[in-house]
Structure formats: C-alpha cells, structure tokens
Amino acid sequence: MSILVKEHQFHLQTDHTSYIFHVMENGELGQLYYGQRIHDQAAFPELTVREEHGAIPAWRLDHPDFQPETLKQEFASLGKGDYRDPAFQITGPDGSRISEFRYRDHQILPGKQRLDDLPSTFDDSDDDAQTLIITLVDAVTDLTLTLSYAVFPHQDVIVRSAKFTNRGQSTVMLDRALSLQLDLPDANYDLLQFSGSWARERHLLRQPLRSGIQSVGSLRGASSHQQNPFIALARPDTNEDHGAALGFNLVYSGNFLDQVEVDAFGTARILTGINPTEFGWQLAAGQSFQTPEAVMSYTSAGLNQLSQQMGVFYQHHLVNPRFAQQPRPVLINNWEGTYFDFDEDKLMAIAREAKQLGIEMFVLDDGWFGHRDDDTTSLGDWDVYAAKLPNGIAHLADRIHGLDLQFGLWFEPEMISIDSDLYRAHPDWTVVAPQREMTPGRNQFVLDMANPAVVDYLYGKISKLIQAAHLDYIKWDMNRNITESFSDTLPAERQVEFAHRYMLGVYQLYARLTTAYPHVLFESCASGGGRFDLGMMYYAPQAWTSDDTDAVERLRIQYGTSYGYPLAMMGAHVSAVPNDQTGRITPLDTRAAVAYFGDLGYELDVTQCTAAEKAAIKAQVAFYQAHRELFQQGTFYRLDNPFAGDGNVGSWQVVSGDGRHAVAARYQILNQPNPAYHRLYLRGLLANQRYRVSGDDHVYFGDELMNAGLFIPHLLATTQGVEASADFSARVFTIDAID
Ligand code: GLA
C-alpha cells in the first residue's frame, strides 16, 4: 500500500519518500511533509504546530493562531489571508474572486489512468501505482476541485494534477489553474534551472533561493529554447552523488510557469503549471477543466540519482511503451548535408553511402514539398516538389527501403507560408488578430491548431504520405513561436483560451497519428530544442536536442539536458566541420564521442567524406551499435561538470543495469601546457568485481575505478609530427567485467 489514510491525514509512501498532508480545521488541505520516507503515525503533532504571528489575518476570531499566511497549504487560493501566489484563481458570476474549497471525500484507485485530451503518465506495466483523488467543494459557486495524486512507489515519483468542475448554474471564469503546489518549511535550497536560447539550450544555472518570487516560464506558445519546464531544488551541499534534491517537471508543451516564492517566514512555495499570463478558461455550467500533469520526485542521494529515477519513470510511465525500450535507429539526415539543394540522385548517393557505413535509416528533411527552395514558401502544401523529386516521395521511399534502410520524412505541420496553395485557399486558417498585421518568424506564420478543420486537414495530408511512402519515422518540426494569438473559431470571451486550445489541437493531431500509425517513430523538434518537454515525449519518444551540432556546444547542451531527461530522448548527430553554427573545427572522433550519448545520427554529406573519414564513421556506427543498449537505456552519471570552474573539462558515463558494463567519456576543450594530473572517478560499478578498461592491460576492481579513479594521461609530449590541433579532444573508455 502506498497510500495510507488515517482520519483526515493522507500519507503517500514510495520506496524512499513520504508525502503527507491533511484536512485542516477550516476544511482546506494543509501540507505536512515531503522528503525521505518516514514511519506512518496516527498524527504528526510536530508537523502541525502553529504559533500566532502579529499583524496578519486569522481564519476566525476564536482561532487567532490559524493564519493562512503561515500555514503550509496544499493548493492555495488568494483572498482569505494567504498572500503568497495562489495555485488557482476563479472569478465567480458576481465578479468575486474568493474561493474556499473544502474537503468532501476521497477515493483510492489502483493504477494510473491516462488523461483524455492531454499527454499523461500511466501504469500499463502494473508497477504498483495507486491514485488518490481528493474532491473539494466551494459551497458558494458550487464548483468542485479534484486533486489527483498518482503514486509510483518504485521510482519515488508522485504525479499531480487538478480538475475544476462547475456544478452550479452560472458560468465562471478560471483565471489561473496550475498543476502543482508544494509548500516546503524552509528555503535553504539552490534552484537549478536550464536556460538558454536557440542553439544553446538548457545550460545549467544554479543559484540559492532568495526572498521573493523567482521563476522561469514561457509565453511563446511552446515550452521554449529559453527556459525548460524542468527545475530542481537542491540543498546547498548537494552534489551529483550526495544530498537532498527535488525535481519538478510538467507534462506540457505550451506556455508554462515554474515558480518558487520564499516568504517572510523563510518557507518556499513551488508552483508549476500553465502560465497564468495568456491563460483563462470559461467554465460554463456542467463543464470541467483538467490541468496538465506535474511530476515531482525527491531523493536524498544526489542529483545523479534524481535524474536517474525520473528518467526511469519516464521510460516506464510516460513514453509510448512501443518505443520506450526499443533500440532507436542510427540515422542519417540530409539537412546539414544538402540544405534545400538536392534531387533524387543526390539523396540516393548519400543513402547508398550511409548504408555502406552501417547506418540504419535515411531521413529526408526540409525542402521536399510544394516548391520549396528556401524557407519563404510552401509550408502547408504537403505534396511532393516535382522539380526536385519528379518520381514522387513513394518512389524515393521504395528505393531507400530497397537498400534495406528505413525511411523518415520531415514535416512542419503547424506552419503555413503566405506563398502556399494552403494560404491561398484558407487564409482564415492562419493565426492573426482582427485588424492586426501578422508578425513573421523565419518568413512563416502559424496555423490555427485550435480549429478542428486544420487538424483534420493535416491528419489527411500526413496520413496519405505515411501510407504511400511507408514512412518509418517522422521529424515533426515547429520553427517559430506564436504572435497575434487569436482563433476565428472562438467567441470573444473565449479568445483567452487560445494558447491552451492550440496545444490541445497539436496533441490531438499527435494522438490521431500515433494511434492510426503506431509503428511510426516520431522525433519532435522546434528549431532544435525549442519544445524539449514531457508533453512532446509522450507522443514523440525522442527530440532533436539542438540545432547546434558543434561538439563543444553539444557537450554543454546535452549535459544540461541530462538533468531532466534520459539519453534515449536526445537526438544527437555528427555533422561536418567547420561547424555551421560556430565555425569551429573539432575532430570527427570528438563529434562522435559526444553524439554517442544520445540517439546517434549523422547529418552531413557522406559522399564528400575521405576514405579515412568513412572508415572512421563506419567504426563509430559499429561501436555505437555494439553499445546501443547502454547508451539508450543504461544508467547515466554526470562525472565532471562542463559548467563548473573554467569549463574546460566535462565527463560522463553510462552503466548497464547489472553494473558489469560501462562506457565513460572525458572531453577536454582546450589542451593545456604542462598539465596537472587528471583522474576520472567512475560511478555505478560493482565494488568487488574485476574489470578491464579499453586500451589498458591492467585489471581493476570496481572500487579502485570509483575511488582511486582512472589516470588520464596528457595529450601531447611534443607537437612534433602532429597534424591536427590537440584541442577539442575526447577519450572514450569501455569498462567490462571479467570473470
Ligand atoms: C529546423 C530544424 C532543423 C531543420 C530545419 C529545416 O531548424 O531544427 O533540424 O529540420 O528546421 O528547415
């Protein structure tokens, strides 16, 4: 049993954590504890202690110490004496914005049901999940609030969401409806956020909490390159291997808010959900609103453990089970190889060469449709560009399949070009506010995904191509953010719902396609990592991590991303040099050594490679295939942080579930003169097991590799005879148990 109920006290227990809350005297829910697992008790008097504070309101005259502002609340409203930012806000029919949701009843259900119209977690594998549903009622508006807590004991994860239902006679307005609130009793934490921009996504930023509100979020209509919905709180002394840490993520791809408020009493309130700016929802009599789900997890064993348990959780309870454990193909994508300049011969030459190198799938990127020679035209016209591919996509696909390669195709479903047949036929399908000019982004505009006719159109077009070309894979791109939010299909008072309805339309299209064509592997993309979130991962098990394929940049991007997402979610490609995003020239081996730690692909014109480069690529592909399960499903450890110190070194490692096999890699950005002695301290091995390390005759015990470390010799004794730069180097070690 992971949900223990006593009187009005709820204790959610996982293998290593406890989450406890109760019904307070006023009927609302109060938070008691979240952290390392503790024994269950009939009551926790220590956790409900109250002291009267001066100059703040109390609930009633006869309860002077019941001061909402000083209480840890479970899902707080504003306006009854708690002045911290609330979890929700409702405007009633009379304009009042006061809500008092009081406990009515609860239910415990086995397992975890999926949500209807939103991506969500599940328990298809009977992994002992249980769901607690608490129903609360506001007597004045006759609204019910159901709070759902799904407990996944073995990954130490609790998934939360809220649902508002209007059982009254009048329409009310939901102005704010977040997914998760957590009031912690102190604020002695660092906030870890993952911030950046296009081509440098998810850089780790770690800073102590301070008084007041600190937040990350997006108002772009996508989760964004700039901030990511994953955040963590860690004690100041928590590192990768030790210490308490809490992780929060949202199963949503649109505007979001992650916020921590530190109040005058030094407590910390975490809020996660749809960004209230640009959100509102009209709730007519009988209607409900379901928030997206938020995932939270706790560990006392450091940040590697936090990432690992959340990653295992996603692979078992969020990612499409068909693909979660399935080996992902090594692909070649023509984008950086050809950009828009290709024809069938050129593509076939690349595909043939790729096949020789051991690559398993060919992906045709942008430029195959309409009359698209650059990014100014044809989005929306998902019919073959006959001037480039006169025999059609199906013909090309047959030839690729004939080489025994899988075939994938790029789409950007949500977008439209002014120069397109679609725009000429349906200008009203484009997102634009009345009497306003449309703001272009990458020369393109956005389709109104809140309009069911648009979703139907796209479903029809994409279906046709999946069937005709027997597509194995689709790269679903999204290359600009939304402006002039407005839908012709919504009445004035519902326009505020647009941003969320847009996302529901995107999810609906994904749901229809993945249901009708379950074998197609989707990779999501938004100019690289602009929508790298759990909402997308529910439908598309992997995502293009960044448009930046430079190995040095990728080291940091993938390192940052790894805090919140497992390697199997990260598309990682080797491209040509000088790199197109940075102009940097890095060795081919280094580019591969970074891309191994993800879903490996190549994104260059392999027909232009020298014989030596081809031989190297062939060896890389074979190496990856031999260790694919480790790279895609192994336990990942961050070893040396490329965001720390002078940022010159980064290293990481993957270990098999049984601890007997590992691959570790150490990257050094600039070579150093007369360097210090460097060691790589491995993790996750079996202390008493003997191992062999590649390139080394010595036999090591696991405890030696983990505690004494592996010596890293410096690169060069002399520059004599050296042709290439010794900068941007990488070393990859395989570590295998021997009996
Ligand atoms: C985006 C993607 C790239 C590529 C281009 C094509 O930038 O991130 O990988 O598909 O679009 O236009």
Image: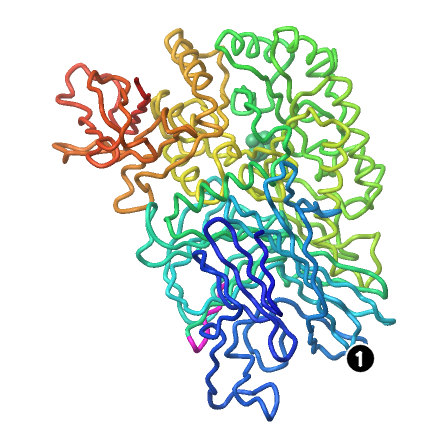
Mark 1, residues whose alpha carbon is within 10 Å: few (<14), some, or many (≥20)? few
Q: Quadrant of ligand 1?
A: top right
Q: Would you identify the image quadrant in which residue 421 lies?
A: top right
Depth check, front residue: 22 or 242: 22
Question: 73 above or below 64?
Answer: above
Q: Amino acid at mark 1?
A: Asp
- Residue span colored magenta: 260-265
Instruction: Identify the residue under disc 1.
Output: 94
Q: Position of residue 566 (x, y in %)?
A: 49, 37
Numbered label tally: 1
The residue located at (29%, 42%) in the rendering is 647
Secondary element type, mark 1: loop
In this rendering, position of residue 497 left or right of residue 120: right
Q: Residue furthest front?
A: 42
Depth check, front residue: 216 or 160: 160
Depth check, front residue: 202 or 283: 283
The residue located at (74%, 11%) in the rendering is 391
Q: Position of residue 336 (x, y in %)?
A: 52, 24
The residue located at (74%, 14%) in the rendering is 394
Q: Position of residue 255 (x, y in %)?
A: 62, 54
